Image (spheres, rainbow, N blue to C red):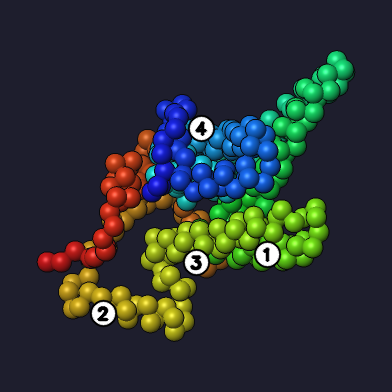
Amino acid sequence: MNGSLQIATAFGIPIRLHWSFLPFLFLFAASVSPALAVPLVIGLFGCVVLHELGHSLVARHFGLEVVDITLWPLGGMARMTVIPEVPKVEFWVAIAGPLVNVGLAALGFAVAFLGQAASSGFVAELAGGFAVINLLLGLFNLLPAFPMDGGRVLRAWLARRRDWLTATEQAVRTGRWVAFGMVALALLGSGSRYLAGLGCVLPLIALFIWFFGGRELLSVRLRHGVSPFGAAGPAAAAFDGVRSEAWDGEAPPPPPPASKPVASPEVGHTGVARRPSVWDPAVEPAGGFDEGKLRELERFHGRLRPPQD
């Protein structure tokens, strides 16, 4: 991710800090005691790193390549070269992060209980706060707001009986309703001292859901040979016309090679064959960009053009 600095490595995975995290830390320190702000931020984002490592290690278990983990003000992001369109793989990769937070919350509550039994109020309070933070992180990430973890779990569940494109469209649509709800909650809570702190955070998260969910839907549509505006209608026809004019009479690019045939492909209600329910990276590579190509694309600031003869 552009503008990030590597600060550590865990299990061979680079952990990066985005530049936007520093103004966030400054504003947070200005709102509370600086001596308290740094430990709180380190503890909070330590939980976020463990959350993202949960995603990453499960992805590795399925043979996927993890590029890095980037921390930024709204949380963390584990980048992978590609995730195959297999519901089982997406489900376990997505659910792993929240499960890590739930496990940490259970550990924190257990330590708090033992600290209370040993009459150590400081340990009990510290462990209880740690447990509550992890529980809230885990539950919040399970909201069905694509591309958050809960939205990806929703897409994996929908893709069991639908094609991948339709499942993505429905998950993105649900996520946008959740985004509207976040904005409404922020507006309604602006007059409440208990919800006043959410007035700035929730709209930013809603914007993230709307923007990045739409970008992933765009990539899925293009990957399935569908117009970004949808499969049918005047907008799709207009897109096809623009795409044809962009080539200016040149021969169109060759079609992508046919994917490996499946013995009995499952078909969704739209008639589009779904990807197989199992995926073996040793037999069928995941494809996508390797780490070197991703770094090269990040450094490129020019305009991408189709190849010319």
Q: Which residue is identified by label 3?
A: 271
Q: Residue at x 63, y 50 (%)?
A: 150
User: Residue 87 or 56: which is nearer the viewer?
Assistant: 56
Lower position in the chain sequence, tag 4 or tag 2: 4
Q: Earlier in the sequence, mark 3 or mark 1?
A: 1
Q: Is residue 1 left or right of residue 253?
A: right
Instruction: Report which quarter residue 169 is drawn in.
Output: bottom right
- So how many labels did they put on this image? 4
Q: Residue at x 68, y 64 (%)?
A: 183
Q: Of all residues shown, which one is farthest toward the left?
A: 309
Q: Is residue 259 above or below residue 233?
A: above
- Tag 1, which secondary structure? helix
Give the residue type that dot 2 points to: Glu
Q: CA distance from mark 4 to mark 3?
A: 35 Å
Q: Nearer the viewer, mark 1 or mark 4?
A: 1
The mark nearer the N terminus, 1 or 4, is 4
Density class for disc 4 (Cα within 10 Å; few <14, some 14-19, many ≥20) is some
Give the label on residue 57, or none.
4
User: How dense is the environment of label 1, judged by Cα within 10 Å: few (below 14), some, or many (20 and up)?
Assistant: many
Q: Residue at x 75, y 27 (%)?
A: 127
User: Under tag 4, what secondary structure?
Assistant: helix
Foreground residue among 219 and 161: 219
Circle on res. 183: 1
Quick one: 60 or 186, which is closer to the camera?
186
Q: Find the distance from the CA under tag 4 to the CA under tag 2.
A: 45 Å
Q: CA distance from mark 3 to mark 2?
A: 30 Å
**Disc number lying in front (3 or 2):** 2
Q: Position of residue 220 (x, y in %)?
A: 44, 60
Which numbered mark, 4 or 3, is in the foreground of this view?
A: 4
Q: Nearer the viewer, mark 3 or mark 1?
A: 1
Task: Say which amino acid is labelled 1.
Answer: Val
Mark carried by residue 245: 2
